[in-house]
Amino acid sequence: MLIGRNAPLDVLHANAAARVLAVTQLMETFSSRDVLDLKQLAATAMILLRDGCDLLNVLGWRLQPT
């Protein structure tokens, strides 16, 4: 995912929130899956969480006083 360092703060926040919410919803499905599905779901969750964390890091960087 490409993150624009100068993207509006509300856009960064909305994208981070969407990814964290997607992981939350994805994890709710874990109890009804077999082992193979869990590996694929975990990999997807990892990507979404990493993207969300990257977005939050940029947001935090942007909110630092200069």
Image (cartoon, rainbow, N blue to C red):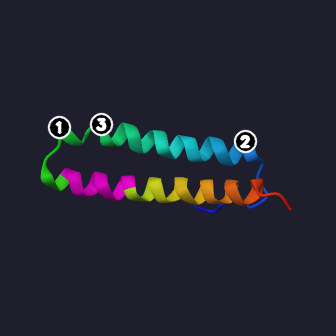
Coordinates of residue 43 in the picture (x, y in percent): 33, 59
Three-letter residue code for mark 2: Asp
On the rendered structure, is 53 left or right of 63? left
Q: Which quadrant holds the N terminus? A: bottom right
Magenta part mainly helix, strand or loop?
Answer: helix
Question: Mark 1 highlights which residue?
Answer: 32
Mark 2 and mark 3 residues within 8 Å of each other at the beta carbon: no
Magenta-drawn stretch contains 43: yes
- Look at the numbered disc 1 and give the secondary structure of its residue: helix
Residue 42, quarter of picture: bottom left
**Cα separation between marks 3 and 1:** 9 Å
Among numbered discs 2 and 3, the one appearing first in the sequence: 2
Residue 53, quarter of picture: bottom right
Three-letter residue code for mark 3: Glu
Residue depicted at 31% across the width and 42% down the height: 27
Coordinates of residue 65 in the picture (x, y in percent): 82, 57
Q: What's drawn in magenta, residue-wise?
A: 37-45
Depicted 29 relative to depicted 61: above or below: above
- Look at the numbered disc 3 and give the secondary structure of its residue: loop
Q: Nearer the viewer, residue 14 or 61?
A: 61
Coordinates of residue 14 in the picture (x, y in percent): 63, 41
Question: Mark 2 highlights which residue?
Answer: 10
Q: Which mark is residue 28?
A: 3
